[in-house]
Every structure is written in C-alpha cells, then in structure tokens.
Image (cartoon, helix red, strand yellow):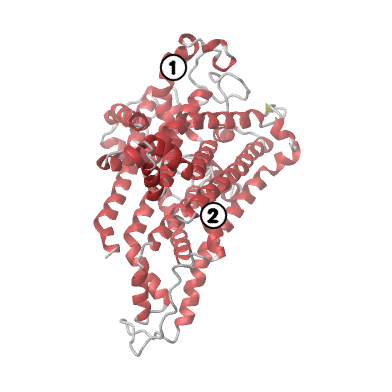
Amino acid sequence: MWLAAILATLPLILLLFHLLREGASSIDLAFFTRLPKPVGEAGGGMAHAIVGTLILVGIAGAIGLPVGIGAGLYLAEQRGARLATSVRFLSDVLNGMPSIVMGIFAWHFLVRPVGHFSALAGGIALGAMMIPLVTRATEEMVRIVPTALREAALALGYPHWRTSVSIVLRTALPGIVTAALVAIARIAGETAPLLFTAFGNAWWSVRVDQPIAALPLQIYEYAKSPYDDWHRLAWAAALVLIGLVLIISLLARFVTRSRHGGVGD
Amino acid sequence: MTDAVPAAPEPLAVAPPDGSTALEGRSAADAVYRSLTTAFAVAIPVLLAFITFEVVAAAWPALRQFGFGFLTSSAWDPVRSQFGAAPMIFGTIVSSLLALILAAPLALGVAIFLSEFSPRWLRQPVSFLVDLLAAIPSVVYGLWGIFVLLPVLRETVMPFLANTLGLGRTPFFSGPAYGNSMLAAAVILAIMILPYISAVSREVLMAVPRSQREAALAMGATKWEMIRDAVIPYARSGILGGLILGLGRALGETMAVTMLIGNRHEISTSLFAPGYTLASVIANEFAEATNELHTSALMACGAVLLVVTLVVNAVARWLVWSVAREPKS
C-alpha cells in the first residue's frame, strides 16, 4: 500500500521536475510581454496567449458562475424535490461529457452560422463546462450552512429570498469562492474545446468576435512542431499554465482556510 | 425534505433589521427568487439536451449517408468520401480499458492506503498530491508524454517487453517500437484517470461505518482480513462506480491521446502500433477537413463518443449514488 502511494505520486513529481528543468530557463520578461518571433529568431514571448487565456476564462466565468451558483442554490434549498434529483443527476452527467464534445457543440452553434472562429464561442464552450462544476460545489457549500442560522433569519421576519441571499449565501461565500476558483483552474487548461472555437491566433487580438490565442492551444501547436525553439517555448508555456493553475488552487485553499472557520460558529 | 424549513412562524410585530416591509411583497419577491433559481436549475437539463441536439445535427449528413455502416466500416478516405469509424471505436475502447487495467490496482491501493493505513499526518499531503494530478491540463500531459514518456517507452520499456520478457512473439507486443502507440496512450491515460478513481474509492471507503470494521476486528480478523472481508465488500458498488467514472474520463480524453497515439486509421492487435481514438481524430483532422462530408464524419465520431460517455457516466453515477444513499448503520 505504501508502494501504491509512492507510485501514484511519482508521475506528478516527475512531471513537475521536467517542467521546471525544461521550462524555467525560457521564462523571462519577454515571455510575458512579447509576441512570438518567426522560427529561427531567438526570443519572443506569448503575451497574446496569456491575455487570450484570461479573456476566455473571463467569458466562461461570466456564464458559468451565475448559472452554476443559481442552480446550486436551488439544489440545496429544494433538496427533496423530484426536479432537484434529476437536475443533480444530469449535472453530474454533463460534468462527465468529453471536452471535445463541448467544442463541437460551440462550433456548430456559434462558429458555423457566423462563418469564422471567435473568442466568444471558445468562452461559451468553457462556460458550459464550468456550470456543472460550480453547481455541485455551491450546493455542497450551501448545505453545510446550519439550519439554525436560516431559521433565525426567518424568525426575525426575513423573507425567504433575503434569508437565502444575505444570510445563507453570504455564510457560504468563502466556500463558493473556493469552488469558483477550482472550476476556473480546471477550465483554464482546457485545449480540446478551443481547437475549433477560439482556434488560436498568431497575432495580438483581444476582440471577442475574432479568433484568439490561448496558452493551451499554443502548447499543443508548439509541441507538435519540429523546431527546438518552439519546444522550449512549449515547455515554458506549460510551466506558466501550471503556475497559473497552482496559484489559483492555492488561493482557493487559502480562502477556505482563512475564513471558512466562520461557517460553523 | 429533511431540511425543509419549519413553517416560518408568523413574524411578530418586529420589523426586519433593514425595516423593509416584510409581510407585504414577501410572496412576490419570494416567487421571483424561487423562479429565478429554478430557471438556472432547469438550464442544466436544457443545456444537456441542446448540446446533444447540436452535435447530432452536426453529424447528421454523415450519419444519413453511411447509416449503421459508419460504426463497422474501417474505410477513411476523404478523397472518395468514404468514412467509417471502426478503427477509432476500437482504439477508444482498447486504450481506455488498458488504462483502466493499469490504473485500477494503483488507484485502489492509494485509496486503501489513505483510508486504512496512512498515518494521520501523511493523509492530507498524499491526497493533495494525487488530487493535483487531476488539475494538470491534458495538453501538459501530452507535452510531457512526447518528450519524456515516449523516449522511455521506445528505448527501455518496449524492448524489455518484447525481448527480455519474450513477449515480442505474441501478436500483442510485436512490430517496431516507434514510441507513438496504443501503449503510450494507455499509459498516459492511466496516469490521468488515477486521481478520479482513487478520489471516489477513498470517499466510499471512508463512508464504510466504523461498526462494520469493529465487528470484523472483534471476530478476530487481522487488519487485512477486515479490509478484504468487511470493508471492500461494503464499498464494492461505489468502487465499481469510481472505476466506470474513470473509464468515462478515459474514453473522452483528447489532447494527451492525440499527441501520443500516433494517429493512424488501422486496427492492429499490437499495442506497439499506432492507433486512433474517436476524440483524437476530431482534434487531429478538423483543421484539414476539406469537404462538408469529412467534417460531418468527424462530428459523427463526436456523436458516437457523446452517446457512449453519456451511458457510461449515467451508469457510474447511479452506482455511486446507490452506495451513498444506503442508510448508514
């Protein structure tokens, strides 16, 4: 059993080790501020892909968070209702849907009719992936809010909606923020849904109705290429992406730890 | 039902802290709030149905043209517009099952270690590290696979399997060892689904009631006998659900597989040979698809994948829930 635990953590340690060894040397200020150079020229960076990823995640969050939190509140408050049971089940099923299928959906729905790739389509595909993650986590967080707190608010004459919004939701907020961060960390690294929606872009673009670059797409592109320079940049981009994901995850843990204690009191 | 708030007592003559008019307008505002959250909740089934509809619509031209033969034919000829998904279906199933076989013992080992053997101080860090495996983006696994895993497989593992163990004479490990292969895809998939299986298994193992363990120990069972005869049988269907959930992940995994499997439309018995999966063909060929039918055939691969993963996931969830719902004794 000890062996299993060691073997299971080994790939992660190896992966992080190689990322650091191959990627760290290529990360400098230019990586964050410049655009890629043509093959053969040294230097260049991935400013456009970093900004692109942030924009895509922003669009996804604007869709995934409100829907997910609203649905999660519903599930927690109407726990026994038949609709809640089926929504809970279907949201788990949606969570298991392959990410490339989300890409097909967004392509057929938003790219094909318009005739060109767009950041918006990519963001919507990612947002759809976020909904079930946020829903189930919100439900869980709202559920652990003590009933006594809710009853106290109702006893004071608060209407149901105010109880839910200003007492229950507020108490569960740190947990929900954590859940949102975890969901964002999860989708920030997704590539498959972006392949034929955001598509990638070699140039600087921040317009949501145009193709946009993203770090995961850039890693895929560069890893497949035959050029050593691009392989180096791919490692560096992967390191930055993992760094982003780790920072968000750690932030999530920090939010939970520093304020979550308040829930039970 | 359980948390249904007891009928709110009629408020006394105390105004709510903000002085709003609690009694009037309450039902209207409550109705708005209620219907708003209901709308968000209903959005989920609607979205699921809409996604299914859109994907089937995208796949329709190819499905209409080839019908059931799309699933059984191995022709893939964009020039003559002949498409069949049999090699991809084969590759998807083989790579995922192989990944499951590789990952299951390890994942269960970790879960049992964490729930039964681990010293308390080690539990948190180990589960954090294993969970972190799930947070690594697929494309990063692919990158690592290309530059680290493939050379190791090509130069060490494959010659070892074929020559040292003498398995090269069997049809399963024959042929040249390029690296890019079904085996490489299965190994990376195994690493990727491990955290999912172990997380679910750990949860259901932890949910086994204490009395169950204590009863076994009181009967004179050793720790290992207790785990084998009292703990695992109790958690069996939950563990099975976790395994199927992992299988679902493996079936739909795209990027890492596309980067490692070698992308060839052929059914080969050898694990050293390149293959293809439903997801990776879409990722790999979409940009090159020249005509409408080729694109639609790719979408049809997506539709097949969608149906399969929906069924697999539904079964898995149902199994996990059936454990979680059992009354705890």
Is residue B137 in view from this perspective? no
Is B46 left, or right, of B320 in this rendering? right
Q: Are marks 1 and 2 on the same chain?
A: no
Is B39 left, or right, of A33 in this rendering? right
Q: Nearer the viewer, residue B26 or A127?
A: B26
Q: Nearer the viewer, residue B159 or B264?
A: B159
Residue drawn at (43%, 36%) of the image = B108
Give how far across and how far down residue A89 sits, in percent. Answer: 54, 54
> At label 1, which amino acid type do we have?
Val
Name the chain letter of the residue that bears numbered label 1.
B
Give how far across and how far down residue A78 sits, in percent. Answer: 49, 67
- State whether residue A18 is above or below residue B135: above
Residue placed under numbered mark 1 in the picture:
B157
> At label 2, which amino acid type do we have?
Phe
Q: Which mark is residue A89?
A: 2
- State whether residue A184 is above or below residue B42: above
Q: CA distance from mark 1 to mark 2?
A: 42 Å
Looking at the rendered structure, the number of numbered marks drawn on it comes to 2
Give how far across and how far down residue B7 sits, in percent. Answer: 44, 79
